[in-house]
Image: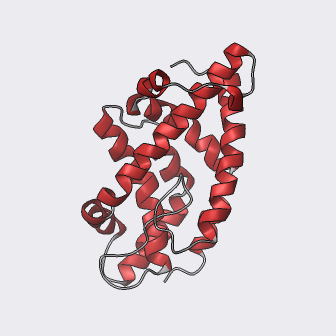
Amino acid sequence: MIHTPKQKRILLSILIILLGIFAVYGFYRPEKTDNYFMLQDDVTPPTGMPDQLNIVSGIVYRHLVAYNLVCTESGQPLNKYPVYFSNKYKAEIRQIDEAWAHRGKSLESVLTDYDSHRYPKIAPTIQTELLDLERQMALMIKAQKANIHPNQVKWTVEDENKLNLKDACVLFDDVAPEIGEKTKFADIFRQFMRNIK
């Protein structure tokens, strides 16, 4: 699937609106444990109650590890997004690692532990999320070609069958940093960082 700069801008505009809605919904419904891009996470540790350190570690796991695991399993590992995330949040990741060190662990060991109990729970949701992203792009391309609004596009079974996780991962790798910037994810993440111990 070819993504022109104009298509990416249109997609980003639509996604920013959708993600803003999900952000408000996710933050005001803390009992909800499913995920949507960069906004929620399963924050329950293997034992005990969730705390700020587990919450921010879950966010780091989702963005630094889980997205790439899902895409790698599809045959299309992410090249840009993990590098972007680790560079953008280098100070926060270091702070989280130091907080875990005070508990006698390292962030690396915690993220490895998450592979066994957190990844199986969030992988299907991440797959759905990535395919939703590709679906929105495909809808916009169809709308552009027909010179109509994306809501007017007739989505067919054939269209749905063309979606695949590999293409979705390529698209995600291209647009996720921009989505993160435009949805103020950094501000939200840093709010969670305030009270880690």
* Residue 98, percent from left and from top: 43, 75
Within the image, what quadrant is residue 109 found in? bottom left
User: In the orientation shown, which residue stands out farthest toward the top?
Assistant: 145
What residue is shown at x 52% (from left), y 24% (from top)? 156
Give 93 or 142, whichever is nearer the viewer: 142
**Is 16 or 139 nearer to us in this picture?**
139
* Whether residue 184 can be seen here: no
Q: Residue 195 in the image: x percent, y percent?
A: 57, 81
Q: Is residue 19 above or below residue 115?
A: above
Q: Is residue 29 above or below residue 10?
A: below
Residue 101's quadrant in the figure? bottom left
Which residue is situated farthest in the left direction here? Answer: 116
How many labels were placed on the picture?
Answer: 0
The residue depicted at 33 percent of the width and 71 percent of the height is: 106
Looking at the image, which is closer to me, 140 or 194? 140
Q: Residue at x 65, y 26 (%)?
A: 140
Where residue 127 appears, as percent x and y from the top left, is: 40, 44
| Residue 178 in view | yes
Query: Residue 99's spot in the image, x, y percent?
Result: 44, 78
Q: Is residue 56 above or below residue 86?
A: below
Report the residue at 43% width, 67% height from top.
42
Give the colour scheme of this rendering. Answer: secondary structure
* Left or right for 83, reference 88: left
